Image (cartoon, rainbow, N blue to C red):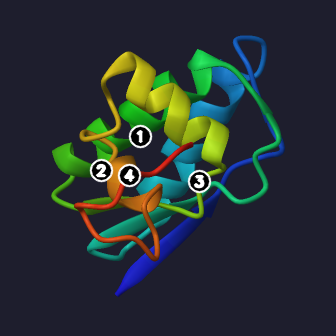
Amino acid sequence: MTGVLVLPATVTVREARDTLRMLRQALRRDGTDSVVVDAAPLRDFDSAALAVLLACRRLAQDWGKAFTVQAPPAQLVSLAGLYGVDVLLNLRSAGVAEHDDRSPVSV
């Protein structure tokens, strides 16, 4: 069973603390074995969004839950690649939907 957490439209350094608090509370209440963070609503963000996702991933792992980011915007995938955390957040594969591993992809 999977719980889905939805990111707000804006996650910048200003909203990061509150967003992480919201996600942490939802994770505590969630009784499932897998957590999916829906990033589709995310429109305005900076590197703090990556920090929030990494912290959420760490919490999920600490509680023995699988962690996935669903529907990340292309700019988030690109930013994660720039910082080298795309693999940790499994965003590399999210950015290559409908492409195989050998195909060049621009994000």
The extreme top residue here reads 13
Q: Nearer the viewer, residue 75 or 104?
A: 104
Residue 49 placement, left or right of 64: right
Q: Which of the two discs, 4 and 3, labels the residue nearer the N terminus?
A: 3
Query: Along the horizontal axis of the image, is 35 left or right of 88?
Result: right
Which quadrant: the N terminus?
bottom left
Residue 75 sits above or below residue 36 on the image: above
Q: Amino acid at mark 4?
A: Pro
| Disc 4, SS | loop
The disc, 4 or 1, on the residue closer to the chain's N-terminal end is 1
* Label 4, label 3: how far apart the Cα atoms are: 19 Å
- Please tell me the numbered disc located at residue 72: 3
Q: Tell me the element at label 3.
A: loop
Q: Which residue is mark 2?
A: 60
Q: Nearer the viewer, residue 52 or 75?
A: 75
Q: Position of residue 105 (x, y in %)?
A: 45, 51
Q: Earlier in the sequence, mark 3 or mark 2?
A: 2
How far is disc 2 from disc 1 in space, using C-alphas? 6 Å
Q: CA distance from mark 4 to mark 1?
A: 30 Å
x%, y% of residue 51?
Answer: 47, 22
User: Which residue does the numbered mark 4 point to in the structure image?
Assistant: 104
Q: Few, some or many C-alpha atoms within 10 Å of disc 4 (few <14, some 14-19, many ≥20)?
A: few
Q: Are marks 1 and 3 in contact (CB under 8 Å)?
A: no
Can you say which quadrant of the picture contains the C terminus? Answer: top right
